[in-house]
Image (cartoon, helix red, strand yellow):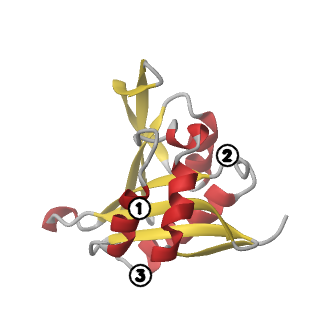
Amino acid sequence: MSEIVIRHAEARDAEALQHLYAQVPVYSGTLRLPYPPASLWEDRLANQSPGRFALVACIDGKLVGNLTLMVEDIWRRRHVASFGVGVDSGFQGRGVGSKLLEAALELCDKWLNVKRVELTVYADNEAAIGLYKKHGFSIEGRSPCYAMRDGEFVDTLHMGRIHGV
């Protein structure tokens, strides 16, 4: 497989991000709705707020993954970040998510003064849970009926990672 290149998302990525999150296996693993409009991504990329860092993964110039890192803006939680991630269904299981997560954690640990990174993940998403555990996250709790997915309520796990612990 060709090298996975991580870079910041740019305005020109809006159409590729729309395509990525229009894939059923991708949006089913997130809180996003089907049929994302291109304007959603155009607006997000044009108006990035401080503390929000959108990374993309590319293979041979094709956008195959996205991770958006969000650092809290509340004074007493500025040491905390969360993120959302999606990987093209044709590239899942090939290290794309791992590379994106490594890049985001490097930003947190070495540049952003983020001590804690937290996330929610569907309790039945074993691949994602394994990825997060591989990168030092641990399960901190469970929320039953957290979200609706494909007509059913599903549970999520809350996971966290504290740098240096």
Measure how far apart labels 2 and 3 are at the Cα level. Answer: 31 Å
- Compare marks 2 and 3 and give the one earlier in the sequence: 2
Identify the residue position indicated by label 3 in the image. Answer: 111
Rendering coords of residue 86 (x, y %)? 55, 52
| Quadrant in which the C terminus is drawn | bottom left
Do labels 2 and 1 touch, CB within 8 Å?
no
Residue type at numbered disc 1: Trp
Q: Nearer the viewer, mark 3 or mark 1?
A: 1
According to the image, label 2 marks what residue? 89
Quadrant where the N terminus sits is bottom right
- Against 20, residue 15 (above or below) is below
Rendering quarter of residue 142: top left
Whole-number angstrom distance, CA of label 2 to CA of label 1: 19 Å
N-terminal label among 2 and 1? 1
Regarding residue 101, the answer to whether it shows in the image is: no
When the figure is inspected, residue 39 is found, relative to residue 10, above or below; the finding is above
